[in-house]
Image (cartoon, rainbow, N blue to C red):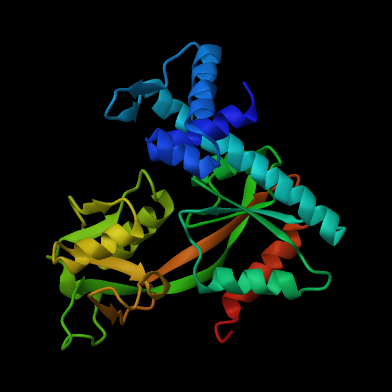
Amino acid sequence: MELRHLRYFLALAEELHFARAAARLGIEQSPLSRQIRDLEADLRVRLFHRTSRSTRLTPAGERLMGHARRILDDIETSIADVQAFATAKAAPLRLGLAESGAGPSFGRLMRLAAASEPPLPVVLRERSAAELLDLLARGALDAVLSFSPPPAAEFAGEPVWSEPLMLVAADRADDRTPTRLSHHREARWVLPDPAIFPGAAAQLHAVLARAGIDAHEPLLAGSPQSALRLAASGAGLALAPLSGIEVSDPVTMRPFEEPGAVLTTWMTLRRDDPSPVAARALALAKLAGEDQSA
């Protein structure tokens, strides 16, 4: 099996259409079909169910799809790492980002890293928090940004910034005044699916619990956009940082009077063997969190 087999497989797995996948790859359909057959022969499994009308993944194909994405992502990240090192003549910051937590402070961190002396190139990898912590433990990353504090003794970390949460509800133009969480004890809540966003889900449950709210049987959202859509439909109330709400979203956004209604981002490092750039990254992240006027 070669890398092109995985690239061809992933294109077909995502398109589920031989003509579209071949066009995306810039090849004819016949070599694509041949490469898929060769891959199935090498693995001794069937990856696709093919009919004259449709192409769909088998369970084995669905399993391989996740592995293929990770393998190709690892290769792209490794290439970026080497290129950044060769260009900057210094080791880049290999940074993991969990749960799509790229708000304004993250943007400030990227600008501070680029403007620092010497410049600190950043190679970014986005995966689940568990996968990123495994990479950090193995020395494949220098630091991880997530919504969870360090989970084990082998890691160290600190909160680097917090963003105020907004109450998100169906659009009511006449109702945009500050509110208190305790005024919404009887509401149904839309919260992140903890299987996908464990850190954010834990923080939002804690914010509600401090206000005396037991968010039993919440609607679980698989993405920030899904949470906003559910709130906009009137299905429930959601909590979201302002940076995660598009201006075009048909929702009402109300700030909270409580100072503790925030979503906090942590930077996690290896405790016993931190990388040379980890301390520098932590200092820049704290500065990014403090520089609210940037």
Answer yes or no: is residue 91 visible: no
Residue 284 image offset from top left, x and y in percent: 69, 70
Residue 134 image offset from top left, x and y in percent: 59, 38
Q: Residue at 45% across / 14% down in the picture?
A: 45
Give left or right: position of 135 versus 116: left
* Residue nearest the observer in this picture, 247 or 283: 247
- Residue 94 vertical placement versus 165 (above, below): above
- Residue 35 vertical placement versus 154 (above, below): above
* Residue nearest the observer in this picture, 46 or 220: 46
Give left or right: position of 250 versus 86: left
Q: Quadrant of residue 62?
A: top left
Q: Quadrant of residue 186?
A: bottom left
Quadrant of the frame with the N terminus: top right
**Hey, which residue is sitting farthest right in the picture?**
89
Q: Residue at 53% across / 32% down in the picture?
A: 8
Give left or right: position of 204 versus 23: left
Quadrant of the frame with the C terminus: bottom right
Residue 35 image offset from top left, x and y in percent: 54, 23
- Residue 76 vertical placement versus 161 (above, below): above
Q: Quadrant of residue 254?
A: bottom left
Give left or right: position of 109 versus 195: right
Residue 288 image offset from top left, x and y in percent: 61, 74
